[in-house]
Image (cartoon, rainbow, N blue to C red):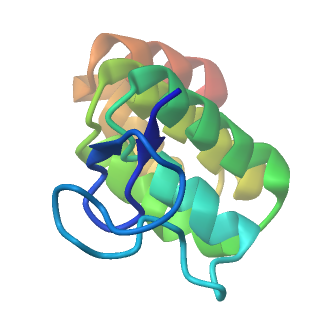
Amino acid sequence: MAFYCWWCYGRNDKGTGPCVHCGRDISPPDSATETKRLIWGTHHPDPDVAIICTRRLGTHGDTAAVPLLRALIKDPPDPYVGAEALTSLLALSSVDAERKLLQELADHGPVLQKHLAQRALA
């Protein structure tokens, strides 16, 4: 089993203690809420983890994730994370609130986001 550092995403063999890459404690801080943990996961080096965390942000219901989701849509680490970010954003916000972004994506976005934006606007 692999563990990832909260601070540098470095892969570690142990779930506790100092990171072998950056030296900081690999555990999340005590103040890390569920939303903060999910946000951390959106940048995970394992794309499956990033996709799952991005999807979960949409069902978690915390609108504090909206700015991050917008940023992930504009500069996704992976096309599938970008598509999940758009789906999650629409679950937390609304088509009316995101109309400008949706129109931009529908006209010039990456294929997955373009399709989702066109469906949302229809």
Instruction: Judge by depth and name the residue closer to the eye, 115 or 61.
Output: 61
Q: Residue at x 37, y 43 (%)?
A: 73
Is 44 or 1 nearer to us in this picture?
1
Q: Residue at x 71, y 76 (%)?
A: 33
Q: Report x, y in % for residue 17.
A: 44, 67
| Left or right, 92 with reference to 100 | right
Instruction: Where is residue 6? Give x, y as percent.
Output: 42, 63
- The x, y position of residue 8, in whole percent, is 25, 60
Q: Quadrant of residue 78?
A: top left
Q: Quadrant of residue 75?
A: top left
Q: Quadrant of the C terminus?
A: top right
Q: Is residue 39 visible?
A: yes
Whole-percent x, y for residue 65 in the image: 59, 66
Count up the numbered dots. 0
Q: Residue furthest left?
A: 21
Instruction: Give the left or right position of residue 116, taking residue 10 as reference.
Output: right
Choose between 10 and 89: the one closer to the eye.
Answer: 10
Q: Is residue 37 above or below residue 120?
A: below
Residue at image position (42%, 65%) is 26
Is residue 46 shown left or right of residue 36?
left
Residue 97: in sight, yes or no? Answer: no
Q: Quadrant of residue 59?
A: top right
Q: Pick the residue in front: 108 or 112.
A: 112
| Above/below status of 119 relative to 22 | above
Residue at x 71% of width, y 70% of height = 63
